[in-house]
Image: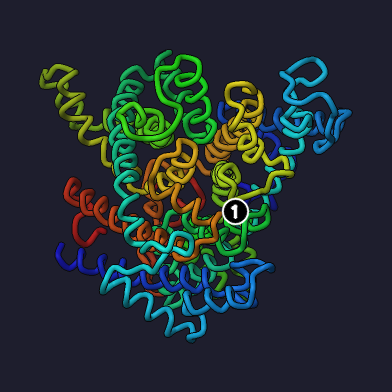
Amino acid sequence: MGFYIARRLAGIVLTMLAVSFLVYTGLTLAPGDTAEALLGEHASAEQVAALRSRLNLDAPLPERYADYMAAAVSRGDLGRSLLSDRPVAEVIRERLPATLLLAGLSVLLAAGLGIALGLLAAVHRGGRLDLALVSGTVLGLAIPPYWLAILFIQFFALRLGWLPVFGSGTAAHLVLPTLTLSLPAMAVVARLVRASVIEVSRSDFVRTALAKGLPPRRVLLRHILPNSLLPALVVLGLNLGHLVGGAFVVETIFAWPGLGRLTVQAIFDRDIPMVMGSALVVAPLCLGVNLAVDLLHGMLDPRVRHGAL
Amino acid sequence: MKLARQGRLGQAEILAGWRQAWRQSRSLRWGLSLLALVLSFCLAAALLTPYAPDQLLPGSRLLPPSGEHPFGTDTLGRDLLSRVAFGGGLALQMAALGIGLSLAAGLALGSLAGYYGGWVDQLLSRLMDGWLALPAALVAVVIVARLGASLDHLILALGLMGVPTFYRMVRSNTLSVRCSAYVEAAVTLGARDSRVMWRHVFPNILSPLVVLATTHAGIALLTGSSLSFIGLGAQPPLPEWGSLMAAGRNYLDTGWWLSFFPGLAVTLTVIGLNLLGDGLRDALDPGLCREEALPQGACSEPQAGDWRASTRTEAERSLPLVRGEGTG
């Protein structure tokens, strides 16, 4: 297990090196002069020169990249924002907790409700409730998050006036963004749990448990359910990428002060150090969570432990 | 039934196979009908409407839906029905070109890795694993941040995002076909690599590819219109569905129709594509495990390694899977 973790960590470090190099060169290398491209055609020569020295554009690319990474790794220094001149790392540290809160709550909600609904549908399979829930998941997977957000705002915030339209600060501000972000993941989890509960309930140990006279409810909750949750766990881990994409949209619509909105705004402002910084923070976070999910999977399922992974 | 056998099947048999699939798969029926509905609606509306999508109608700004303008008009007095209908063409273009790009790159790299194995496979697979682990939206955002926001760059980003998924699928399927007895036989008879690839490998990976492309088109459409919505994709004068909704964002209270109809269009199209994907999977690949039921790559993927080292029994075991007759 220790060797496995070490190998995976090494893989993450290698991936991060490749990613950071691609992001760095991708964002600072362009046909023609990067500084001129960034400032537009109306910039004066001094402005261009200032930006060139600011982004250290006169040094050769490998040297610039090495400098950037050395500063990032040793001092956590990701450069300064072109717009506000504040350290990028500081701004990201400010914005990250809001995104983590939103993402964490969404995952919890998606997992909790998704498992419950999937179980409910499987128990009533073939019935009307099942059909309704399955249709619900088809819709949940297809509805664009931004439209869902708009419908929520129109109904709960504008029509009923129950919840604030956008912003942050109170628990009420969290409700709509969390719902919007979690719904697609919830649909995936519900579908999977339904399918795997149905599959597991056909296995021999379930028949044995029922045959020896255990109450069906106990068989369902103690025997079938725990064995049905693994695919949902794996898919939740794989869905993390979609969650990041969702966060860009949801944070923008609800004016949520998180990393997603920061990044989108930075793109509009052509604030390259800021975009680079957030990409380099989000990528290892995702890689790390993927590793955590795989390890958890291994701990929960002896079949995938060690060599099988 | 398999697309792969079309060459050897009579026309009537193929038709009968599809008819049976149509009868048996509710997803196929609903998916195809829904897509046909959306497409024909867009086509009919675009052909029949008296208003061009960018035609400003004086004195008719922000009109609610009526007989004259069934979807209402937008803030500049443009007919929304005509804009949504033309948006359908853009959506089609976005999905088709994006998927085409992923498909082409995934097919080229995946068959290279799957067919030749060895260090090419190792290198490409590690690269794609890392790529896949990154959030797709982040990749898209970096591309758009560098190149600027436009529909073309969005399509490029969508295409690049999909490459690892197609790569893994092509690679694992090529690998299992490569180990099969009939490929071994063809190689023994002296067939060239290109002939083996074209005659034996490609037809066998076609069906899962069609299924993957269909499901992936839905994802591409959703991601693409999301990015357009937040301003990182198609730019305003273009009636792309996501940017149409972005224009309605400031009129949630007074102009619900501005965001309602484009949103409905995206949702119906994606539902149609998802159902069609499910239906095609039922029809083409009875033995293929469902993508959503297992983590990506868990589908009967042989361990990375040299195919030449595979024993005869392994090759035999992989055969039914390839043909889609067993569950493995």
Image quarter where the N terminus of chain B lies is top right
* Amino acid type, callout 1: Leu
Q: What chain is tagged by disc 1?
A: B
Residue A178 at x, y percent in the picture:
37, 33
Residue at 56 percent of width and 54 percent of height: A268
> Is residue B172 in view from this perspective?
no
| Element assignment for label 1 | helix
Left or right side of A67 for A204: left
The number of numbered badges drawn on the structure is: 1
Residue at 43 percent of width and 58 percent of height: B132
Residue A74 at x, y percent in the picture:
26, 74
Left or right side of B263 for A170: left
Residue A308 at x, y percent in the picture:
25, 58
> Is residue A185 in view from this perspective?
yes
Viewer-proximal residue, A38 or B137? A38
Mark 1 lies on residue: B206
Residue at 26 percent of width and 59 percent of height: A309
- Where A210 falls versus B182 (above or below)? above
- Where A52 falls versus B272 (above or below)? below
Left or right side of B154 for B113: left
- Where B280 falls versus A54 (above or below)? above
Residue at 42 percent of width and 85 percent of height: A63
Viewer-proximal residue, A138 or B261? B261
Q: Residues within 10 Å of mark 1 (few under 14, many from 20)?
A: some
